[in-house]
Amino acid sequence: MADQIAVVGGVDTHTDFHQAAVIDTIGRHLATASFPTTPDGYRRLLEWMRLHGDVLAVGVEGTGAYGSGLARFLRGNEVSVVDVDRPDRKARRANGKSDPVDAYAAATAVLSGRAHGRPKTRDGIVEAIRSLRVVRRSAIKSRTQTINQIRTLIVSAPAGVRERLRGLPTHPVDAQLPALAPARTSPTRPAKLSPFARPTDGPAAERCALDRLSQIAAAAAPPRPIRRDGPLTLPHP
């Protein structure tokens, strides 16, 4: 009976679905099926594999990315999970992409011993540090981009502004920016640096830039009232 044999699973992972495959201990292909990347989909995938026999191990592609949720679920259900490298991209281009074939290949890699990587846990202090580093890199990149934009605008700013800011380090430039904001009633005053006349970090700078742009645009071209002689009618299709 099916529950008396041992099987090995393989999973080709994707964003919205995972392709699973099952082989026996001598490498024969038994079945393949697709499951959604949801808690219910993970549960059905494991139940489906167990219908074919005692699951010795499951090879999962990308346990640190697309397969992280499934890997956590399988480990939580006391299933041995092996991290499997994705097939060589050059070979994929030459032979064509096939999700069932990749799933069988993942299972075969586990059975043959070619795949023996430990899955990434994606939890604990290491994951917290990784997440914070991602946020930090994004903040530094955004900050650097803003500073570069300011430096570029200084080059073409009016002479008084350019001489005032020329050669200053970043922080003194930040301190000078609020004084460069134009008055609401003086839209013709040179204001090329006004979008940055607020803190240059995070969403506050973005909102400030949009507010300044709206003010200057409205002063330069005030919206005109829409005149209609009668009710608005739409043409028949």
Image: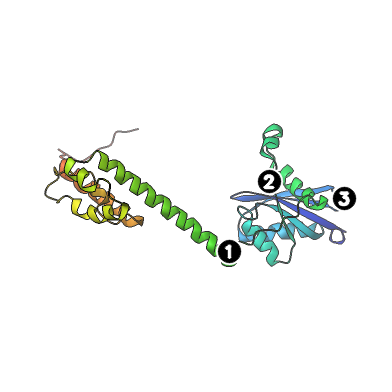
Residue 144 at x, y percent in the picture = 38, 49
Q: Which residue is mark 2?
A: 86
**Neighbourhood count class around disc 1 (C-alpha, 10 Å): few under 14, some 14–19, many 20 upward:** few
Answer with mark 2 or mark 3, whichever residue precedes in sequence: 3
Q: Quadrant of the C terminus?
A: top left
Q: What residue appears at the point 32 percent right and 44 percent down from the top-left corner?
A: 149
Q: Label 2 vs label 3: CA separation?
A: 22 Å
Q: Check if mark 2's residue and mark 3's residue have beta carbons within 8 Å.
A: no
Can residue 222 be spotted in the picture?
Answer: no
Q: Label 1 vs label 2: CA separation?
A: 24 Å
**Dot 3 lies on which element?**
loop
Q: Quadrant of the N terminus?
A: bottom right
**Dot 2 lies on which element?**
loop
Answer with mark 3 or mark 1, whichever residue precedes in sequence: 3
Q: What residue appears at the point 61 percent right and 52 percent down from the top-left corner?
A: 66
**Of tags 3 and 1, which is closer to the observer?**
1
Q: Label 3 vs label 1: CA separation?
A: 38 Å
Q: Amino acid at mark 1?
A: Val
**Of tags 2 and 3, which is closer to the observer?**
2
Q: Which residue is mark 3?
A: 26
